[in-house]
Amino acid sequence: MTNRTYRLRHSAILALAVTIALACISRETPERIDLEVSRVFVTEPVTGERAAMYFSVTNNGDVDDELLAVSTAAAEVAEIHRTEHEGSTMKMVPVDALTVPAGGRVDLAPGGYHVMLLELTQNLFPDDRFDVTLRFRHAGEVVARARVIRYEDVEELVGGAALSDPHNSR
Ligand SMILES: [Cu+2]
């Protein structure tokens, strides 16, 4: 082995070592994004014009995420709302973004956060199903399947979720 070959091999090994070292450092940097949307349901509309949609978002990743928008072919407009109680009256306030903390879960449930479907484009009956697209700041678009249920069945599906939602107990 000539001296020159040795030097070339040596620098190649050095370059490889640097690459591995950099890969080890950068492995820490990319944040894991892992969102799960579950129990998506819509209560049977009373008026035929609007319906409320509820679901849970579980953030298994290590970065806080935000629900920014919702869309579906079943409605012209879908808004994220928060129900606020003022004495005996209830009002709904549009929300720009809904934070889902890393390692946490947010339950949209009656009395708290919900997505209001306005200007429905089709009749919705119990057990009907349709796709909804949820857009998150980091996870991007997540498509989920919504199911229409009778209002009487809400409690059964939500269980204690409405109470465990920190937003609802505020
Ligand atoms: Cu609303």
Image (cartoon, rainbow, N blue to C red):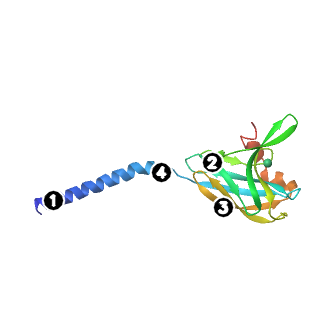
The residue indicated by pointer 4 is 30
Which tag, 1 or 4, sits closer to the chain's start?
1
In the rendered image of this protein, does residue 128 appear above or below residue 46?
A: below
User: For mark 2, what is the residue?
Assistant: 66
The kind of residue tagged 4 is Pro
Q: Nearer the viewer, residue 115 or 165?
A: 115
Name the residue type under label 3.
Val
Q: Which residue is mark 1?
A: 6
Closer mark to the observer between disc 1 and disc 2? 2
Element on which disc 2 rests: strand
Kind of residue indicated by mark 1: Tyr
CB-based contact (under 8 Å), mark 1 and mark 2: no
Neighbour tally class for label 1: few under 14, some 14-19, many 20 plus, Cα within 10 Å: few
Label 3 – label 2 distance at C-alpha: 15 Å
Disc on res. 27: none
- First in sequence: mark 3 vs mark 4: 4
Q: Position of residue 38 (x, y in %)?
A: 70, 56
Whichever of callouts 4 and 2 sits on the residue coming sooner in the sequence is 4
Q: Secondary structure at mark 3?
A: strand
Residue nearest the observer in this picture, 92 or 152: 92
Label 3, label 4: how far apart the Cα atoms are? 24 Å
Residue at the spot 55% in from the left edge and 53% down from the top edge? 33
Mark nearer the viewer, 1 or 3: 3
Residue 131 at what x, y percent from top left?
Answer: 71, 63
Identity of the residue drawn at 77% across and 45% down:
162
Q: Is residue 43 left or right of residue 96?
A: right
Determine the CA span between mark 1 and mark 2: 54 Å
**Alpha carbons under labels 1 and 4: distance apart:** 37 Å
Q: Which residue is mark 3?
A: 143
Disc 1 element: helix
- How far apart are labels 4 and 2 at the CA level? 18 Å
